[in-house]
Image (cartoon, rainbow, N blue to C red):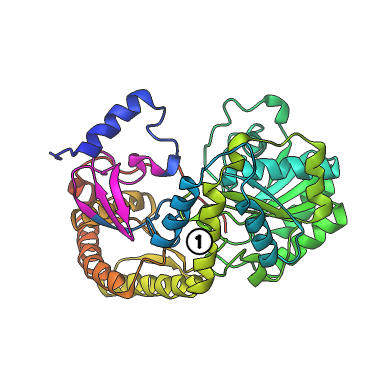
Amino acid sequence: MVMAGKGTELWKRAKRIIPGGSQLLSKRSEMFLPDQWPSYYSRAKGIAVWDLDGKEYRDMTIMGVGACILGYADDDVNAAVIKAVEGGSMCTLNCPEEVDLAEKLLKLNPWAQMVRYTRTAGEALAAAIRIARAHTGNEKVAFCGYHGWHDWYLAANLASDRNLEGHLLPGLSPAGVPRGLTGTSIPFEFNRDDQLAEIMGKHKDVGAIVVEPMRHHFPKDGFLKNVRRIADEAGAVLLFDETTSGWRMNVGGIHALLGTNPDMAVYGKAMSNGYPMAAIVGKEDVMNAAQGSFISSTYWTERVGPAAALATIEKLEKKDVPSHLKKIGTEIGAGWDKIAKEKGLDITLMPEFSPLIAFNLNYGEKSQAISTLFTQEMLERGYLASKSVYVSYAHKHEDVAAYMQHVDEVFGLLKKAIDEGSVEKRLKGPVAHTGFRRLTS
């Protein structure tokens, strides 16, 4: 019998009055450890998280879903936010920070000349698609990767329940998306520019091509350059979604390291260390099309987001944070790999994008139950843990060393459970859900 904490009980209450229990699929307790996950925090600092019962955990998993690149409640960013709040977070006049941030983003993206803001990357992508369509006069979108919840994207699932299989979220329902959008968004696979070329050959009215330049694997065989060429030949706007990839391998967009520039790039998540902020950076001729469409929202003009982003970017540069993220991520991956080999646990490491280090368990249908057992056992040892870690600047070498001592013990336990056929018997609750599976790049 599992002893329910305050967070577990609150989660049960939440599910009765909030559809899905949370505003974000990735934060649903069932995605981690059904009936056992602490679910709510009272405070967080660095990589430490305290639940509603006052129990402390170390976060070795998604770190605010990748938003807190410097660690929770970073002192420098918080100071900038407090100053912004005390000076007034909203006003009839505009905050000067949004101009300062635009100039900074353009310096980091010398191929671009203009910037627009939202407060989440999903809405930034929706605005960017609107701008691209306005610029080209064409409505269709070709895409690969994950790009949020808006209608333009989920329209890809209108024609077939399996249209996004292998591209995004298997079985994701487009309920509520207008049927009139059927056929307007067309998926292709990462590193398959041949598929994109085929799409462009069949559809002469593609206005935008949207790509995550990288997730877990580097682009191969000139993929991004070929996508750039195809976009140019078709007169389509090339949009890079840097929501996840941005700021982690370098200060700015990873496309700068990969040697291909887009027409527009969208940034979010890590650029403001947990405070809502997102930006569309783009070429002047494309971005000016925004003037011919109504794209406007009150809270896109508040002060906290730009202030947080400026402080975050300043610290990313000053402390060379991406180098730290890569070192720590590589260290975590090497630790997992070494211990798994010692214990005889069959895993596949995904080491290329080391700031978002991850591994897969190679046990077919049993893998999800094994993963749930890993999360359960690590939680009992004081860790929020899963098969991936969004590395932050607050993760230090000593944190990794302490974490690996427990991983050593738990990997051994997993192997024993697999050999005995006792994985599910050892679980104190149901197997975690698998509804948010990213299968690209």
Helix, strand or loop at disc 1? Answer: helix
- Percent position (x, y) of residue 234? 86, 52
Work out whether residue 49 can be spotted.
yes
**At 74% across and 59% down in the image, what residue appears?**
262
Q: Is residue 199 above or below residue 149?
A: below
Q: Amino acid at mark 1?
A: Thr
> What is the crowding at mark 1: few (fewer than 14 residues within 10 Å), some, or many (at least 20)?
many
Horizontal side, residue 396 vs residue 123: left or right: left
Question: What residue do we see at 57% from left, 52% from top?
Answer: 306
Q: Is residue 185 left or right of residue 171?
A: right
In this rendering, the answer to whether 398 lies above or below 205 is below
Left or right of residue 152: residue 49: left
Boundaries of the magenta span: 27-56
Give percent across and percent down for residue 118. Answer: 61, 44
Query: Looking at the image, which residue sits at the far front?
Result: 87
Tell me where residue 25 appears, x and y as whole percent. 44, 40
| Residue 158 among magenta residues | no
- Residue nearest the observer in this picture, 436 or 425: 436
Q: Quadrant of the C terminus?
A: bottom right
Q: Which residue is mark 1?
A: 312
Q: Quadrant of residue 255?
A: bottom right
Residue 360 in view of the camera: no
- Counting every numbered tag in the picture gives 1
Residue at figure coordinates x 57%, y 61% from the top left: 246
Name the spot of residue 258 as percent of width and height, x first. Answer: 66, 70
Query: Quick one: 439 or 82, which is closer to the camera?
Result: 82
Which image quarter: residue 189?
bottom right
Magenta stretch encompasses residue 44: yes
